[in-house]
Image (cartoon, coloured by chain):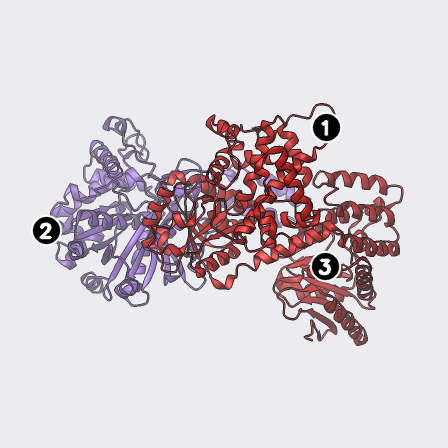
């Protein structure tokens, strides 16, 4: 067994414990690593040093958190509780060392990593953009269980600590310094000196003032809980994401009594981690890793990207690539067509980067290029012009001879089959689809579209490129709508059918949101643009079993395109849909609405699996979650089928077919679904 | 004296041939009272990256970057290095900034050319940039001294005493732009030196205005015929594009120009804002290469820099600088005016360009000031500043030397001409000139 730690002792008699998990690029707290940590603490205690500094040997950061992979194999409540109690013991040993202890933090210090740092007397952090501290546990359906709820409230005060844990957000070292989470925020070059300095000074470790501990008074706690719970409810649905509410309840019941709080942590976190929501969220976390592994950055190191088409998609793709560090040229017919894209890019850079030097560098990397000279220098050429096959083919004929021999040619088409697009190329196999989703800066998924003619090297290059720009690549076979639009379209069309039947848009959207979708289908259609929906629906009409609803076509003909024209199914004002407030009491939830929407999406997913659009059920779930925001706590459409029971879902489909028509006809692929 | 004659006879650019691969410039934007969205480094960056993109070269393939700039911003010390790094040339590519007032851009080209001729470099990005709208407005020295006192005042009493010393004179601001355009030795503004020349060569207000009108008309025609392909648009962060030199007034007329009042020798002078160069922001960048680099990287060649000359003269007559710089080049190569196909003489002032052409053909001037037995033949008007100049498109001081060189080469290519001269007058009493050539064989192929 390779050791995960090394100990050294400097001339000032300070012990340095370096965490460097064997065979890994990041430190995560596996059981094995924690046990070795415990032994090392015993060893160091016997050395009687003047102090101890815990520091990471990884470039990626301090400690990224607990071992999420281990949580994925449902551990059982008892064994989970036992594990947590054991970690409590180990961190208690750290906390009770006879000499001062410091966590020297750079990069990621998250979840269990932060809880370990909190068990030290002092923390110093690096003041840079890579250093992030926080408790992401609620995002995985649990809350901090390695003593984090006890030590953070003691250090920061109850309100600040609860808000940090409830939000699941991360903070920089400078912000952490301001709230008291770290004692010093220093440049990387001063991290070691600052840590040693903390030991030399050996001041009393920081604690929250009594004022900040006031909310933990037993008589105030219920009120504080109600206020915080109502804040959380604005963001998440209690039924779907119970963890933050469980955290508040845990705090309300035990705050003020440390030993009760530790015990409650162990009990509740062990229970939560075995519950469906956490298991599904952990599944999503691991699916994300699976998609990341689809692309290998070492396969391809692009330096320059040329994007053709300065519209919203092309402009945003170009801006995103520049934001992620690539040099980008952006082409359109004339400078006037590029000015808006440049403006949007500047806004994106300022919003994402903040640091003015980083913003400047991103601006400098993005070059408007109305002459299209960049084609010759590019490693990746992304075509993002309007959806017209003749125009695209004419463009390819122009650029293909100019491109570098090994450069990747990609189309952002959302609907035209690859084989048709590339038919006139000298080398059709070099063309791949790179289907970005709108808004590019927010949507993590990138569909990498290929067909049987596509050169395998180009597909892996495209997936590697996706990783270089920090997107999740999903390899999909070229067929109408690929995966995401394909499964979304029946869902959206069913929503329009429901409208036709006289059900109010708000009721339809409410049903979808209640299921866990981030936004209802009607609002989504308006947001995407009804013209785009119509064009995709038309292109897919053959594959779908129901005709495109007239209402959609009528609206488009009238120029009501949704959000962008301020009128679609909804009226839009200041970028928000105007939804009439429901009159009287909200109508009872009709289970038919939600099933009609979701089961059409699922039935289409089954069809995609049967046709081999994606490799397997997990990839399908990953694609639909990261491409559409499909209720993450449900673990994906296919996972939902299995949770609910595939036989039951199938039966429900048959029933819906009887009542509403053959577009609910179960796909033949159901035979292969266990 | 002997040494100087010697230098004039052999010139400076002996050694390897110096090729100009291509060049690009920003539109020149007239200063309209407030800082433009682009700092000097932004301008040079825009021109430089567009140029490299056109040529198809990675920024880190250049050996060095040389930039001319009269006054860069407070965050742009050694602006060439700032631009090189922002272009992505990489940490290992050195960069340096040169300053020879209005000829700074030309100085950068010459410095780059010398390094290539001498075999020290093969590929150099060189040019000039100036954001005159960003030239600072400063506190005067009285105020600077007072601030020193204030910062040292430790007690409330001392601070009170310091405050009591403040007088209105402390608050008089120093506008760097205006001070920079005033000769620090003879005390004349640049416009006043033009008035000197106007008087000496009997140039009338009408001559000047006619010349100014011609400048606008020629630029207008060049824009209409897409004759300025070296311009690369600028984009700001607010959705605006700047695609053309915005000082152009195609609707200008003799009447309109005649209505303007003299600005330098008020109220009696002849030099007006209309017949002077515009104060502008802009940058021009060129890629210079050795023949070896051209071959190795398969680069196109726009033309070559063949010879260069600097000259000094009375600061009060600085406008005649081009005559003094061009004459030794003509002498060395045994040329007369008709041997040169195109002339770019920077239009600082209409009076100054006209004074140059007069002096060029004046036997007296050539004998007394250039030690020549006879005058030069006249410079054909249709070969001088053929697409306008500083009066119509602006004169961002650090950039103009690079712009006129680039445009002379582009005009030579367009017209199939062989030889050109780019020259400018330099505040402080100097002149600079470059001799440019194109191989016509390439055009025939």
Residue A69 occupies quadrant: bottom right
Q: Position of residue B390 (x, y in %)?
A: 29, 41
Q: Answer whether labels 1 and 3 touch (C-beta < 8 Å).
A: no
Between tags 2 and 1, which lies in front? 1
The residue beneath circle 2 is B374
Q: Is residue A361 in view? A: no
Which numbered disc, 3 or 2, marks the residue closer to the eye?
A: 3
The quarter of the displayed image where residue B226 is located: top left
What is the chain letter for disc 3? Answer: A
**In this image, B263 relative to A84: left or right?**
left
Can you give x and y, in whole percent of width and height, for residue A613 in the image?
52, 51
Is residue A69 shown above or below B216? below
Of all chains in the rendering, the one displayed in purple is B
Chain of the residue displaying label 2: B
Task: Specify the label residue A71 is tagged with.
Answer: 3
- Residues A454 and A662: in front is A662
Q: Residue furthest top?
A: A583
Q: Chain of mark 1?
A: A
Is residue B178 positioned above or below A53 on the image? above
What is the CA distance from the residue labelled 1 to the residue labelled 3? 39 Å
Q: Position of residue A84 (x, y in %)?
A: 80, 60
Question: As drawn, is A124 to the left or to the right of B7?
Answer: right
**Could you confirm whether marks 3 and 2 are on the same chain?**
no
Chain A drawn colour: red
Q: In 3D space, how far apart are the residues under numbered discs 3 and 2 (Cα atoms)? A: 97 Å
């Amino acid at each position: 067994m390779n050791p995960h730690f090394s100990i050294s002792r400097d001339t000032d008699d300070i012990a340095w414990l370096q965490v460097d998990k064997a065979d890994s690029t990041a430190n995560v707290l596996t059981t094995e690593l924690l046990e070795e940590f415990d032994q090392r603490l015993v060893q160091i205690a016997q050395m009687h040093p003047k102090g101890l500094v815990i520091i990471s040997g990884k470039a990626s950061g301090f400690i990224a958190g607990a071992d999420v992979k281990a949580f994925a194999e449902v551990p059982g409540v008892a064994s989970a509780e036992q594990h947590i109690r054991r970690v409590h013991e180990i961190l208690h040993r750290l906390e009770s060392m006879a000499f001062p202890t410091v966590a020297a933090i750079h990069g990621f210090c998250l979840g269990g990593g932060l809880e370990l740092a909190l068990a030290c007397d002092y923390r110093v952090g690096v003041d840079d953009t890579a250093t992030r501290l926080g408790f992401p546990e609620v995002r995985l359906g649990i809350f901090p269980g390695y003593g984090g709820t006890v030590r953070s409230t003691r250090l920061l005060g109850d309100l600040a600590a609860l808000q940090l844990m409830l939000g699941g957000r991360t903070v920089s070292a400078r912000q952490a310094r301001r709230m008291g989470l770290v004692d010093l925020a220093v440049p990387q070059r001063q991290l070691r000196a600052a840590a040693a300095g903390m030991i030399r000074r050996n001041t009393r470790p920081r604690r929250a003032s009594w004022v900040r501990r006031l909310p933990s008074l037993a008589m105030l706690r219920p009120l504080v809980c109600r206020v915080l719970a109502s804040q959380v409810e604005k963001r998440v649905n209690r039924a779907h994401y119970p963890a933050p509410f469980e955290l508040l309840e845990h705090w309300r019941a035990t705050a003020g009594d440390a030993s009760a709080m530790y015990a409650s942590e162990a009990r509740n976190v062990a229970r939560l981690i075995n519950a469906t929501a956490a298991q599904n969220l952990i599944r999503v976390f691991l699916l994300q890793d699976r998609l990341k592994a689809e692309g290998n950055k070492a396969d391809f190191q692009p330096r320059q990207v040329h994007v053709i088409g300065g519209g919203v998609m092309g402009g945003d793709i170009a801006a995103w690539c520049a934001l992620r560090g690539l040099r980008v040229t952006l082409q359109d017919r004339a400078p006037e067509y590029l000015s808006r894209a440049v403006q949007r890019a500047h806004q994106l850079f300022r919003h994402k980067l903040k640091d003015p030097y980083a913003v400047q560098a991103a601006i400098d990397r993005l070059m408007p290029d109305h002459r299209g000279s960049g084609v010759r220098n590019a490693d990746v050429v992304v075509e993002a012009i309007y959806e017209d096959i003749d125009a695209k083919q004419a463009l390819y004929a122009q650029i293909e001879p100019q491109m570098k021999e090994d450069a990747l040619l990609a189309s952002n088409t959302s609907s035209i089959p690859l084989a048709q697009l590339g038919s006139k190329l000298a080398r059709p196999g070099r063309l791949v689809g790179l289907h970005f989703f709108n808004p590019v800066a927010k949507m993590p998924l990138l569909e990498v579209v290929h067909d049987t003619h596509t050169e395998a090297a180009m597909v892996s290059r495209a997936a590697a490129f996706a990783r270089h720009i920090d997107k999740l690549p999903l390899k999909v076979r070229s067929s109408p709508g690929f995966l995401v639009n394909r499964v979304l379209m029946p869902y959206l069309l069913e929503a329009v059918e429901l409208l036709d039947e006289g059900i109010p848009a708000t009721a339809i959207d409410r049903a979808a949101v209640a299921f866990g979708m981030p936004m209802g289908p009607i609002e989504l259609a308006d947001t995407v643009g009804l013209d785009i929906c119509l064009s995709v629906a038309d292109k897919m009409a053959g594959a779908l079993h129901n005709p495109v609803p007239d209402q959609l076509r009528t609206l488009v003909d009238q120029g009501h395109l949704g959000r962008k024209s301020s009128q679609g199914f909804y009226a839009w004002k200041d970028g928000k849909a105007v939804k009439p407030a429901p009159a009287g009491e909200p109508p009872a939830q009709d289970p038919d609405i939600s099933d009609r929407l979701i089961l059409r999406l699922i039935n289409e997913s089954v069809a995609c699996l049967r046709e081999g659009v994606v490799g397997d059920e997990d990839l399908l779930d990953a694609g639909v979650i990261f491409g559409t925001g499909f209720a993450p706590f449900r673990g994906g459409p296919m996972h939902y089928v299995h949770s609910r029971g595939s036989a039951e879902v199938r039966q429900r489909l048959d029933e819906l077919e009887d009542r509403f028509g053959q577009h609910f006809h179960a796909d033949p692929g159901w035979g292969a679904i266990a | 004296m002997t040494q100087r004659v010697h230098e004039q006879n052999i010139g400076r650019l002996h050694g390897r041939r110096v090729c100009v691969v291509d060049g690009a410039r920003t539109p020149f934007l007239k200063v309209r009272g407030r800082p433009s969205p682009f700092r000097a480094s932004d301008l040079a960056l825009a021109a430089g990256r567009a140029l490299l993109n056109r040529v198809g070269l990675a920024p880190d393939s250049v050996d060095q970057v040389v930039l001319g700039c009269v006054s860069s911003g407070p965050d742009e010390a050694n602006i060439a290095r700032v631009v090189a790094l922002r272009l992505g040339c990489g940490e290992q590519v050195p960069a340096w900034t040169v300053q020879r007032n209005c000829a700074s851009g030309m100085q950068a080209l010459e410095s780059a050319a010398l390094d290539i001729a001498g075999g020290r470099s093969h590929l150099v990005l060189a040019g000039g940039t100036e954001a005159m709208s960003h030239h600072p407005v400063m506190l005067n020295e009285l105020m600077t001294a007072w601030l020193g006192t204030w910062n040292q005042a430790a007690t409330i009493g001392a601070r009170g005493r310091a405050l009591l010393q403040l007088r209105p004179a402390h608050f008089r601001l120093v506008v760097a732009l205006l001070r920079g355009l005033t000769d620090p030795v003879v005390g004349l503004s640049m416009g006043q030196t033009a008035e000197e020349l106007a008087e000496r060569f009997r140039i009338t207000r009408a001559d000047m205005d006619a010349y100014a009108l011609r400048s606008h008309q020629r630029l207008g025609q060049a824009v209409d015929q897409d004759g300025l392909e070296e311009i690369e648009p600028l984009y700001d962060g607010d959705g605006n594009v700047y695609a053309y030199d915005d000082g152009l007034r195609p609707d200008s007329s003799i009447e309109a120009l005649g209505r303007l009042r003299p600005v330098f020798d008020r109220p009696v002078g002849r030099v007006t804002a209309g017949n002077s160069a515009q104060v502008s922001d802009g940058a021009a960048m060129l890629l210079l290469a050795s023949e070896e680099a051209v071959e190795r990287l398969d680069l196109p060649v726009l033309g070559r820099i063949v010879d260069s000359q600097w000259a000094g003269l009375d600061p009060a007559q600085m406008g005649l600088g081009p005559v003094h710089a061009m004459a030794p080049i003509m002498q060395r190569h045994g040329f007369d005016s008709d041997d040169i196909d195109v002339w770019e003489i920077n239009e600082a002032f209409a009076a100054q360009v006209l004074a140059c052409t007069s002096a060029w053909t004046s036997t007296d001037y050539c004998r007394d000031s250039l030690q020549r037995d006879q005058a030069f033949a006249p410079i054909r008007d249709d070969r001088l500043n053929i697409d306008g100049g500083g009066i119509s498109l602006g004169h961002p001081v650090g950039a103009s030397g690079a712009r006129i060189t680039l445009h002379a080469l582009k005009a030579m290519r367009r017209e199939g001409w062989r030889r050109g001269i780019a020259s400018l007058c330099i505040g402080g009493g100097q002149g600079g000139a470059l001799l440019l050539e194109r191989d016509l064989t390439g055009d025939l192929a």
